Amino acid sequence: MECISVFDMLKIGVGPSSSHTLGPWRAAERFIAELKDLNIFDKTERVTVDLYGSLSLTGIGHATDLAVMLGLSGADPEYVPIDDISGIIDQIKQTNILNLGNAVQIQFNPSENIVFNKNFLPFHANGLSFTAFYEGKEYVSTFYSIGGGFVVKEESAANTEKDEIKATFPFPVDKADELLAFCKQENKSISELVYENELSLRSPEEIDHELMRIWNTMLECIYIGCHTEGTLPGGLNVRRRAYDTYQKLKGDLPYNNPQEWLQTIRKTKVYFRQILKWVSCFALSVNEVNASLGRVVTAPTNGSAGVIPAVLMYYLTIENHKAGDKEIKQFLMVAGEIGSIFKKGATISAAMGGCQAEIGVSSAMAAAALCELMGGTPEQVTVAAEIAMEHHLGLTCDPIGGLVQIPCIERNTMGAIKAINAAELALDTDPKNVKVPLDTVVNTMWQTAQDMNNKYKETSEGGLAIAVNMADC
């Protein structure tokens, strides 16, 4: 039984894509670690990178090439200053020299050393191989970015190396039915059960600190997006809309930072039509930052990073002005647990399952979390997640130009609105009358993913991706 922490599902990183940017970035870091373990790091003279399948087909638009260069350079996506990224990339391109692991200078010409192979490797749609050349020898290591920033190697994907970690979870859960059984057995809410699991890995202080660090990153991301105007990079010339929407919605109360800004919004009277606009504004802001290689929280992916913070902001600014850290942590723990059930039973990779695996899962996570905060029972929480996913089944991934912009950014607003509606429907539902349990919709989503044509799975070979000509933008 695979036990996934909340902090596996909610990662801090750099946009625009968890599977195509964060995953390859982490793979590059792991490759450097392997070189050091094999005592060939200091001997490495040259490195090449081969991108396969979806990583190749939409790699440029998803900044996969930039991600592997940043990872090989020793930059950490969680902490590297965003303003430093362009400088690191420009230096490599101008000099054809890469500072491997920030320690060893090697020749590296991005146009020659990063190879885009359109063929797919059999194990997963997102494959990439690193080759180190040293003393007339070669070392090759292949990784797979399986969604949400998770990276695996084929030979270790099915092993049980982490059994000692898995065994530490007192309430291991693969399916929603198991989660509900534990909640009933222990007489606990879902968030309380998740907290007990996290305590087996971290101290209470670490859990609280990391959950609030995740939220503060989300809040800062929303704040930046609402206060930044202009056009998104990449060639589509998409104008940022969060700034324009926010200008129409904002009040005149003073503030100096994201926390004060949140309190300002809470003091603003909001009516139904404005609620829709505020939630959309929050979601747009996050994914515009994501599209600009900004720092976001993978939730559960970068392409769907706006749904959860938008719904949590809705709760804080519309539903419960007295809510604080306790409710924020509760929300994130429930969201993380629901996301893990989808990852275990289906996928959170758009390259494997289309956008239902990203926006659909994020909407289910947000709906479940909101439902618990609004007084829902564990059974109603899973009903909320099921409703949200049910109405995203079959959603394709068809980014124009391989960019995480159209239709990705707007889809976050739709996912957030659906999540709120799903939570409300669940709160008015008697779980005994539900015909489709959450586990059934997870299984259905995975079956739908397997049946879906590959051109609708983050390859930019179908749907809107081919309906719009980049040259006309």
Image (spheres, rainbow, N blue to C red):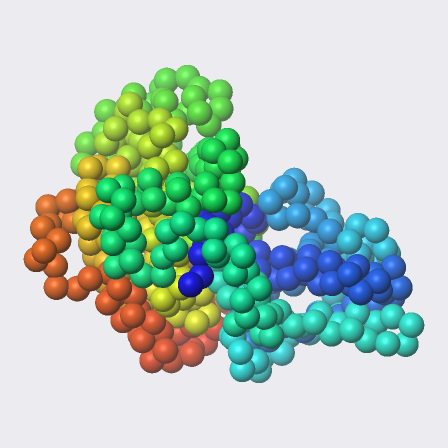
Q: In the image, what residue occupies the spot 29% across and 58% down? A: 178
Of residues 177 and 404, the one nearer the viewer is 177
Q: Is 262 situated left or right of 94 in this image?
A: left
Q: Quadrant of residue 327?
A: top left
Residue 75 in picture, x, y percent from top left: 70, 49
State the residue in front, 167 or 321.
167
Residue at left 9%, top 50%?
430
Residue 446 vertical position relative to residue 230 in the rendered view, above or below: below
- Residue 473 position in % (x across, y down): 47, 61
Q: Is residue 98 left or right of residue 403?
A: right
Tell me if residue 318 can be seen: yes
Looking at the image, which is closer to me, 89 or 44?
Answer: 44
On screen, residue 381 versus residue 211, left or right, reads: left
Specify whether 330 is left or right of 289: left
The image shows residue 174 at horizontal and vertical percentages of 36, 61
Residue at image position (10%, 46%) is 428
Write the residue at 81% across / 54% down.
Answer: 99
